[in-house]
């Protein structure tokens, strides 16, 4: 009998699996589940991007193998975006590479820079690939409590001081998934200075840089003088242009690190389908009104959710950015833990959310709520929750707290 493989044994059971199974069972039984779990945009891709795809796919030459680094026009479009948006100059030949979404870029960068036993510093809670891309590559992970200020910097320095061997890289993610936390340039300056002092690589995920609601647009780490010496930044078109299934993202920054990623990718793929790359360039180079419109939709939904859930008795902090609310579990349910609470919402309120534990142990006590349903459905979710919370005294005694449940 084949034993379980070493790399697979390093991956814990998928926390979301039981919630997803319960959601599927409820739908199969006829329940109308309002799904606020997965961050899967429900709005259409802007028409001019689709038109460019259709135009390009009709050309037989575009059906050949593409380039794993990304076609030249696409890399130039991403360079122009960084110049326009952040005032950052990039060489499209050496400092830009197209990826199959930011997730693939992160995973293959981990393959490119990690040796077995290397220590990587990762915030917690965070998007799972930030951690598990390195775990699959054989690294050891040290968690840093997610933060955007002095506490995070001190935790980073302590982790470096107490690690053997010394950490190789630190992951940043602002605006953050799942917490929606944002960072400013002053914070980035401190991180860059510390990375140079401690000989650390910085891997920065800014996939939600264009989904912001309050204050100034989120900055890029690469705006900091000298950041290019130590950092690579990952972006995605998935949320900016409603293109999640297109799997189009980028890594930009230090040319040595970009070169390492390019070398790994050259063995693994031929890049995205060329018409997708051409359409992605059209997205970056074309009219940007659609970006503002998408942002406004998420802001309206955010405000609707905060208001509707408050009426139900659940105070959800309004996020300053991203398409997610990071909400503490209401006090009467906190003893259940995030997985059991998420399951209960499906069973009793026909509402699906993501348990905070799925983003790391420091995510326990919270759930992530995605703004992926329209306002009518969000208000319906609020009504369902209000009805459930009102009857909670009659249902809670039948629920086994998570720490007493063998299924986790």
Image: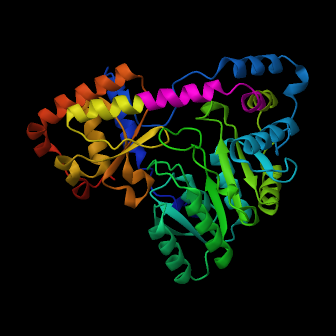
Task: Determine whether, in the image, residue 67 is placed left or right of residue 52.
Answer: right
Counting from the top left corner in percent of width and height, residue 374 is at: 42, 22
Counting from the top left corner in percent of width and height, residue 303 is at: 37, 32
SS assignment for the magenta stretch, majority: helix
Residue 227 position (above or below residue 62): below
Task: Determine whether, in the image, residue 91 is placed left or right of residue 351.
Answer: right
Residue 162 position (above or below residue 41): below
What number of labels is visible?
A: 0
Residue 19 position (above or below residue 24): below
Q: Quadrant of residue 34?
A: top left
For residue 291: magenta? yes
- Residue depicted at 58% across the width and 83% down the height: 164
Dividing the image into 4 quarters, which one contains the N terminus?
bottom right
Counting from the top left corner in percent of width and height, residue 151 is at: 44, 69
Counting from the top left corner in percent of width and height, residue 120 is at: 59, 69
- Give the residues in magenta: 281-300
- Residue depicted at 17% across the width and 36% down the height: 389
Instruction: Looking at this view, name the residue that lies furthest to the front.
Output: 215
Compare residues 361 and 16 and report the one nearer the observer: 361
- Residue depicted at 79% across the width and 49% down the height: 96
Q: Quadrant of residue 394?
A: top left
Judge whether residue 12 can be spotted in this image: yes
For residue 362: magenta? no
Residue 361 position (above or below residue 48): below
Instruction: Looking at this view, name the residue that lies furthest to the left.
Output: 394
- Residue depicted at 41% across the width and 29% down the height: 301
Judge whether residue 271 can be spotted in this image: no
Task: Determine whether, in the image, residue 170 is placed left or right of residue 301.
Answer: right
């Amino acid at each position: 009998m084949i034993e379980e493989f070493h790399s697979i044994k390093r991956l814990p059971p998928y926390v979301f699996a039981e919630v997803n199974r319960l959601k599927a069972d409820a739908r199969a039984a006829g329940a109308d589940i309002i799904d606020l779990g997965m961050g899967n945009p429900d709005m259409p891709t802007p028409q001019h991007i689709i038109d460019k795809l259709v135009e390009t796919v009709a050309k037989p030459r575009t059906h050949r193998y593409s380039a794993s680094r990304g076609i030249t026009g696409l890399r130039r479009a991403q360079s122009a975006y960084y110049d326009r948006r952040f005032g950052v100059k990039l060489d499209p030949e050496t400092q830009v590479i197209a990826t199959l979404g930011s997730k693939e870029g992160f995973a293959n960068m981990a393959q490119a820079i990690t040796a077995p036993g290397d220590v990587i510093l990762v915030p917690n809670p965070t998007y799972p690939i930030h951690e598990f891309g390195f775990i699959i590559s054989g690294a050891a992970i040290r968690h840093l409590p997610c933060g955007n200020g002095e506490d995070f910097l001190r935790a980073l320095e302590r982790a470096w001081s107490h690690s053997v061997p010394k950490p190789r890289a630190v992951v940043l993610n602002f605006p953050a998934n799942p917490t929606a936390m944002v960072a400013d340039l002053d914070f980035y300056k401190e991180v860059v200075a510390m990375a140079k002092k401690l000989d650390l690589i910085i891997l920065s995920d800014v996939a939600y840089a264009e989904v912001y609601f309050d204050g100034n647009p989120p900055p890029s780490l690469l705006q900091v003088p000298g950041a290019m010496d130590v950092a690579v930044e990952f972006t995605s078109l998935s949320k900016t242009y409603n293109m999640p299934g297109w799997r189009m993202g980028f890594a930009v920054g230090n040319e040595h690190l970009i070169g390492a990623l390019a070398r790994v990718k050259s063995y693994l793929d031929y890049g995205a389908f060329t018409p997708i790359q051409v359409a992605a360039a059209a997205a970056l180079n074309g009219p940007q009104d659609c970006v503002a419109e998408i942002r406004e939709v998420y802001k309206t939904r955010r405000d609707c959710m905060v208001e509707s859930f408050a009426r139900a008795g659940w105070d959800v902090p309004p996020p300053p950015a991203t398409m997610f609310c990071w909400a503490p579990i209401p006090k009467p349910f906190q003893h259940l833990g995030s997985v059991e609470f998420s399951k209960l919402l499906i069973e009793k309120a026909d509402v699906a959310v993501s348990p905070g534990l799925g983003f790391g142990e420091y995510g326990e006590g919270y759930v992530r709520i995605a703004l992926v349903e329209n306002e009518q459905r969000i208000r319906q979710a609020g009504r369902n929750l209000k009805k459930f919370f009102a009857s909670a005294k009659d249902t809670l005694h039948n629920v086994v707290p998570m720490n007493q449940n063998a299924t986790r």
